[in-house]
Amino acid sequence: MENKTKKKGLVSTCIILVIALVMATVTGISFSKKRNFVEDIVVGSNVTGTFKLDEYNENLKGTVGDVDVYVLKGEEAGGSVLILGGTHANEPAGHMAAILILEQFQVSKGTVYVIPNICQSGLTHNDPLEGTPQYLHFTTKNGEMRTFHFGSRASDPIDQWPDPDTYLHTSGNWTSDKIKEGVKTTQTLSGSEVRNQNRCYPGIADGTVTERVSYAVTNMINTLKIDMVIDLHESSPEYAVNNAIVAHQDALSMAADTKLELDGIDISIRVEPSPAGLRGLTHRELGDYTDAYALLCEVGNPSQGRFRGYTDGTLAISGKDPCYAAAYAINDGKLLYVDYSSGDFPLALRVARHVATCAQLILSMNFEIDDAAREVIVDNFEDADMIDEFYNDLVEADDLGLWLN
Ligand SMILES: [Zn+2]
């Protein structure tokens, strides 16, 4: 009798072990595939060069953070703009808008630098327990399938571990005479924020990989004397800072000009001033520690918010979610900060907003600086009419793949 029970116990132990091994193998393969998946960014003749970010922080060499910087340099010398995508890898419009810009902008004067995957580590994994998709797929006009990461808000713990109990953000060795006396340059945050790319600026040269990336960006802007930096994000529809430009105080008037111009072509956008004491973010630190005009753009992402229902690639691309539609129906839409009256908020619309905002910010920068030597001209986004046409075409087609190479 005892032997029989023992045998039974051994059999169930073996079955559980086999199931555990199968699960570990399946998830291990999936994890490894995502970790090593390289996005097929298709570079056209508009891209005049690329370089590695380690040019501005040698401590990035051999790390996941040593990403490519794409250079779109016009024939005529002028000013320069840096566009950051993928800061938060679970905000696909920021990542995809940067890719669309690097594939489509025809720069004839000045230089546009694009880093579409500034937090590459975040792109290579997903947030635990969120059930989000790993990839997004698009079909181009040639019928080819292109695949991109949908990732996590934060860097992968594989790249920096463990998180501290609390993260003390500091500005490292950076100094700035722009910061008023009495304004704190440090901030205590929850431990996991140590892996949040947008809490690690201006960065530390030999810090965590996330801090090293931020350091390289700050150093690159200072070394190349970049005139404007735009960081592209998304936010939950229930988050108050939405469909907005967050601007450092030096960049407020050009953000306001962009708002007025976009209002003129029926793209409604808000302007939010960057709070002086909110440390670690691009719109604060890159404005304080460089001479660039620092701005961050937000657009509402239904696949990110807490009200969302089943979350897959279809939701991320279509933005159609019955749970958000139900939330919008309560209290005349006042629960949300995006217009969800149509029952969706598609990725094509979100990307169109970001690209239009970047194009208009460049026009507003030219207007504000009013110096031909520092102008940036993008031939196919040269005026409000071109921006309007691009925006309406993409929103109407509702198919981002058609705008990818
Ligand atoms: Zn974000």
Image: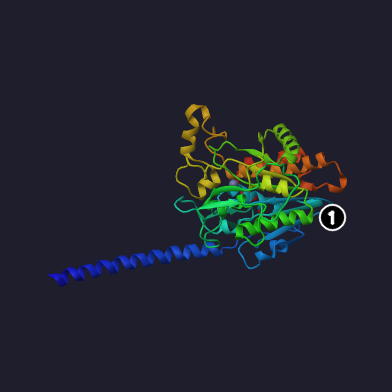
Q: Helix, strand, or loop for circle 1?
A: loop
Q: Residue at x 48, y 62 (%)?
A: 30
Instruction: Report if residue 144 is visible in the image.
Output: no
Q: Position of residue 58 (x, y in %)?
A: 69, 65
Q: Nearer the viewer, residue 124 or 278?
A: 278
Name the residue that disc number 1 marks: 75
Q: Position of residue 113 (x, y in %)?
A: 74, 54
Q: Nearer the viewer, residue 372 or 156?
A: 156
Q: Position of residue 337 (x, y in %)?
A: 56, 34
Q: Nearer the viewer, residue 374 or 207?
A: 207
Q: Is residue 79 left or right of residue 121?
A: right
Vertical placement of residue 250 versus 97, above or below = above
User: Which quadrant of the figure has residue 10?
Assistant: bottom left
Which quadrant: the N terminus? bottom left
**Residue at the top extreme?**
332
For badge 1, the amino acid type reads: Glu
